[in-house]
Amino acid sequence: MYEKINVMQNSFLENLNPEQLEAVEATEGALLVLAGAGTGKTKVLTSRIANILAKGIFPGQILAVTFTNKAAKEMGNRVADITQNRSQGIWLGTFHSIGSKILRRHAGLVGLESNFTIIDTSDQLRLIKQIYAERGLDEKRWDPKIMLGIISKWKDRAVTSDKMSAADNVDFAGGQANLLYVDYQNRLKSLNAADFGDLLLHNLTIFQNNPDILSEYQRRFQYILVDEYQDTNISQYLWLRLLAQRHKNICCVGDDDQSIYGWRGAEVGNILKFEKDFKGAKTIRLEQNYRSTSHILSAASNLISKNTTRLGKTLWTESSGGEPIKLMAMWDDQEEARTVANEIESLQQVKSHKLSEIAILVRAGFQTRSFEEAFINRSIPYRVIGGLRFYERLEIRDIIAYMRVVTQNNDDLAFERIINTPKRGLGPSTIQNIRQYAQEQGVSMCEAVRLMLEEDLFKPKVGAALAGLIGNFDHWRSLIDEMSTPEAVELIVKESGYFAMWKEDKSLEAQGRVENIKELIRALDDFETIADFLEHVSLVADIDGMDQENMVSIMTIHSAKGLEFETVFLPGWEEGLFPHQKSLDEKGSSGLEEERRLAYVAITRAKERAYILFAANRRIYGQYQSSTPSRFIDDLPVENVEKIDSNNGFNFGKNIEKPSYSGAQKSQNNSRSARSTAKSPEGFTVGNRVFHQKFGYGKITAISCDQLDIAFEKAGNKKVIDRYVEGA
């Protein structure tokens, strides 16, 4: 037998609360540990592994799986410390790494060799496109990224390409989705390759078709431990169930209240039905929190108690006191960002608060821009976690490139960036020819195209596309002095086809890019000219020279799971944004419950203080939209919040009413939100008298989609986008 670890010399059983100790010592049989936020689940897992080893179990008889390499590394290091490095040989890693290890041993059983390649997303997409070409499918009509997402979901649900039922097929690619899946899997085998979804899917195939191999691993893994069980998908769930059938010594640690990844295949039902899957299973609740104050825990617990599909637990702490959650009502998102910046500066001055212990957690990526602007203006160092800074994002850099060319005809770097974006049928050789011609003639690339068109040096289709682009730039330059900055840029984004390109894109990231474009146009309202904005953007990089360690973290709530901060700001708690309307529309009550779990995760990231902010108006696509406070605010106990209303007009009681403002407040804000009251585009007809903030009164002479030809009484004839005028 493996030499036992001396429990007395290794004090891993000390400093455990009663529930933690019970979970560590209950090594036999199925166990579900419901570990609330900040209750020490990693401590329980590592101590449990040490306790199993202390009984004389060989390390190789223990399987411990996590979701991230970071979590696996942390767990491995802690176990090594506790056991004095006598834990080598434990099968400890992510689902994917353990699945890969098993698959390489038995690759031949699924048509692969042991040295198979694991391909990444870019290679997967390239493979799908090749299959599209062979089947004559149009990529523009059937986005390959969507097809890749469909295949990924099938694999998450353990649906193999050779055993699909009619119910599994989806209405995509003209009904050929299942055939594309078959082609994709066959191509992977011919390349001796697998994607991440295959690592467990092939394991399931091997286990189901080879009972002797399954039995081998069932005998081997006498003890199984699983971290973040609430995030498992169906494939991971089936894989674990198969491996645990012999000894049934499986311990799953998780929190149904923190299941927030339904959009990527996680099934909260896996943890909810644990006791049914493993008869006689024991459930232990870890409810003593070591992270947050009592105000934060009480608010979070009351909020999550409104969910009906949960196993139930209530977090508590021995630490009394702490600050109530500050519930702050703002006029708009700009005031929201300024207020957060003010609070951060105050915390630094009064409490010597480290910026690295402050986080801003947003529901949607587009929310970060207003905070970035406020921090840049105040010289507050920040970093965007899990994403690029706003002005570094692809879609924003593309639009800025269009703006640069409009204002500076010889900006070759910007021109080359967007000459074929959106696609205009230009190949690398055409662009190289333009570049070479420009160098020979000593002119800009934009001017080179103009000269080459005059000399008829392009093929007809290419020439027509480039002539249209040059014509557009000439047209836009003629308008920028006559239109407001957001109007001009919105026109550029629309007429260039750039906005339509992302609107028609059905990939997962496309919607976020559309929101970012709208947010950029909204931001332009603060600048008199495009040139002013471009100068502002060029100065943004100055913040990069600041202290890289002591920085405020800005991230989405999804990215913040597992993290903790002294102070957390939670902006944008408004209906439609949080809970997000898309989640409600697509998944109904289950979507609402996942959004509420997301709110619970957000609040419990805070250790000392939390701020929840909501705005009466949020500018989207250049327009103010009235907002209603999130329904989640009604779930916060009155005794755990401090209500701060900067406008003296909000009703903070239960069933919060729409905020009302005094006439003075309305008048004060009319100048900056006049366009938000513009008449609906559907109501405009030729002959209508309208009002424009810059050009004054005029009469509509023609309408083309959302563009109006208007004869203004003082400014003359102008083309204006309908959203920027109102009926007079």
Image (tube, rainbow, N blue to C red):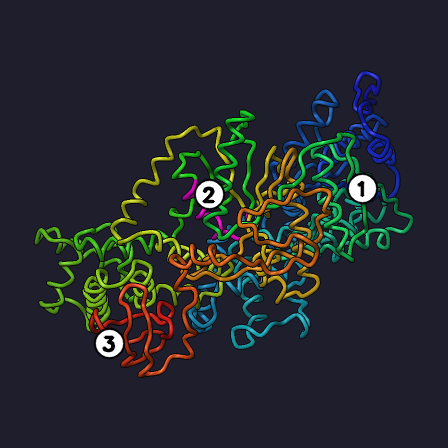
Examine the rendering and report whether any part of residue 61 can be seen. Answer: no
Give the residue type at disc 3. Ala
Q: Position of residue 159 (x, y in %)?
A: 67, 63
The tally of labels here is 3
Q: Nearer the viewer, mark 1 or mark 2?
A: 2
Q: Position of residue 353 (x, y in %)?
A: 55, 28
Give the residue type at disc 2. Arg
Name the foreground residue: 165 vs 573: 573
Dot 1: within a 10 Å radius of its alpha carbon, few (fewer than 14), some, or many (20 or more) residues? many
Q: Is residue 161 above or below residue 650?
A: below
Give the residue type at disc 1. Val
The tag earlier along the polypeptide, 1 or 2, is 1
Dot 2: within a 10 Å radius of its alpha carbon, few (fewer than 14), some, or many (20 or more) residues? some
Which disc is residue 338 wearing?
2
Examine the rendering and report whether any part of residue 136 can be seen. Answer: yes
Q: Position of residue 347 (x, y in %)?
A: 54, 31
Which disc is residue 711 wearing?
3
Q: Quadrant of residue 233?
A: bottom right
